[in-house]
Amino acid sequence: MTMEANAEMHLVADASAAIDAGRVDEGKQMLEKVLLEKAAPDDEAFLTEQSAALLRLGQLHRDQKDAEALAATVRASRQFMTTIAKAKTAKLVRVLIDYFFDIPGSGNIQIEVTRENAEWAKQEKRIFLKQNLETKLIGLYYEARMYREALPLINSLLKELKTLDDKMILTEVHLLESKVNHAISNFPKAKAALTAARTNANAIYCPPLMQAQLDMQGGILHAEDKDYSTAASYFLETLEGFASLDDPRTLLAFKYMLLCKIMLNQPQDVATALEGKTVSKYTGSSEIEVMKAVAKAQTERSLEEFEKTLREYKTELSNDPIVRHHLSALYDSLLEQNLLRVIEPYSRVELSHIAQMVHQPVREVEQNQMILDKVFQGVLDQGAGCLVIYDEPAEDETYEATLGTLKQISHVVDSLYEKASKLT
């Protein structure tokens, strides 16, 4: 190593010290000076120091919340990255792109930089890096709800990965495929993609974090099928998996598990679940408080209390489409329960009275589908503005018994016919 290179190596430590002391511009210039130096391809020590300078400069832009400067640093570093090992390049690029997550409002820039680096990796024939960046890009598209851009990239990447048979990345891409298809309400494809992800995961060692994500998606899809019992089991597995890794998504898994308990009409289990040691630190969070409030409204069969909860926790509910979707179904269920409770003592009751009792507009009561769904027997007299309720008709078992008898007679006749055929 030359004396000049050795001196440059000390600049990284000096630059970090200057930045920590508040001399940010001075430290930044030192780091940029290190990166401008050209090192020999076999000078591993100096190349390592340049990598450290690049990461420190990226951290500086991240801490300053300067997404444009971070993007410029990533673009400018490509020439340097052609001089280091491919494995180190992949790690550096991924770390630098991840710094965007800590900069609010940098989603579009992060997508652009990731797309550019994927193209660069393709031109440089760095296949592993290209696949990793395209996988990350799909995830960014999903987070940004750019599903139309995500699907073609998923299809092309899957074709490439199946040829190489890289089951770890295949598992990740199939999981993203399932999430994207679920987001656009293509549930058959979402289920098929999750099955493919599980198949690939079973063929290799699946890291706990990936397993937890698979369980989370499994729970979400079972909840879509109204199989809340199975979904709750999946979310419990997810909760334990994320909690063991201290992953922030533990709270989300816990919230979804409580949602399933509520949808199963078991609001009392919410209080029991909150007593667990694993989730005790989440007890006071707004995400859990909204679940407690919904469970309370369900216990009291109070539509008014439920609507109050929806207003108070509007932000928490509107930000999560999964919770919003299922609570919409719960709202319909609570409205039905309240309507049944009000009309139960009557054989004829005014619609205005029902609307007043359930605190809903008369039009909302009129448009309810309970009669058509045969929740109760009745007819709507719109001329008089009344609901006429009939007694539940006694079930006549004669029809079913007659069908059973005819079925048995048919068997006997068929049997006699076969025996007669053999005699002739």
Image: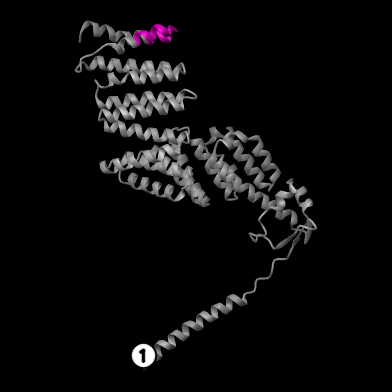
Depicted 89 relative to depicted 282: above or below: above
Q: Nearer the viewer, residue 37 or 197?
A: 37
Answer with the quarter of the image where residue 38 lies. Answer: top left
| Residue 303 x %, y % | 69, 46
Q: Which of 317 and 188 is in front in this view?
A: 188
**Circle 1 SS class:** helix
Which residue is identified by label 1? 422
Q: Which stretch appears magenta?
A: 16-31
Answer with the quarter of the image where residue 176 lies. Answer: top left
- Residue found at x 51% / y 47%: 232
Quadrant where the N terminus sits is: top left
Q: Please tell me how crowded label 1 is: few (under 14), some (14-19), or many (20+) other residues with Cα within 10 Å.
A: few
Instruction: Please state if 242 lies on the left or on the right of 156 as rendered.
Output: right
- Residue found at x 70% / y 55%: 340
Q: Looking at the picture, which amino acid does disc 1 mark?
A: Lys
Answer with the quarter of the image where residue 129 lies. Answer: top left
| Residue 152 x %, y % | 38, 40
Depicted 351 relative to depicted 405: above or below: above
